[in-house]
């Protein structure tokens, strides 16, 4: 039986686990639409916690 911590493939991309985050809106971009330091912190914490992929449109 597979679980969320098993390796998997998404197309040609090999993933260490099955944790995938869907696209979300945090409203944290600067006035030019660029990432703020706060949003970089969110992605740093997600990566440190084991999330390996984020689906974006």
Image: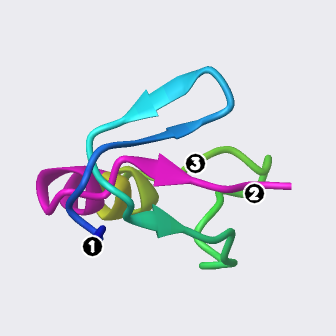
- Magenta span has 54? yes
Q: Secondary structure at mark 3?
A: loop
Looking at the image, which is closer to me, 23 or 11? 11
Q: Position of residue 44 (x, y in %)?
A: 25, 50
- Magenta span has 4? no
In the image as oriented, which residue stretches furthest toward the left? 48
Q: Would you say the residues marked 1 and 2 are in contact, meaning their CB atoms lie under 8 Å apart? A: no
In the image as oriented, which residue stretches furthest toward the right? 57
The magenta-colored residue range is 44-57
At a point 54% along the width and 26% down the height, the residue shown is 13
- What residue would you read off at disc 3? 35
Looking at the image, which is closer to me, 47 or 20? 20
Q: Position of residue 52 (x, y in %)?
A: 36, 47
Q: Quadrant of residue 55?
A: bottom right
Q: CA distance from mark 2 to mark 3?
A: 10 Å
Q: Earlier in the sequence, mark 3 or mark 1?
A: 1
Q: Secondary structure at mark 1?
A: loop
- What residue would you read off at disc 1? 1
- What residue would you read off at disc 2? 31
Q: CA distance from mark 3 to mark 1?
A: 39 Å
Q: CA distance from mark 1 to mark 2?
A: 47 Å
């Amino acid at each position: 039986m597979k679980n969320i911590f098993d390796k998997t493939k998404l197309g040609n991309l090999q993933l260490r686990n099955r944790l995938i985050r869907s696209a979300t809106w945090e409203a944290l971009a600067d006035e030019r639409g660029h990432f703020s330091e706060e949003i970089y912190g969110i992605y740093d914490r997600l990566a440190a916690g084991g999330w390996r992929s984020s689906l974006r449109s």
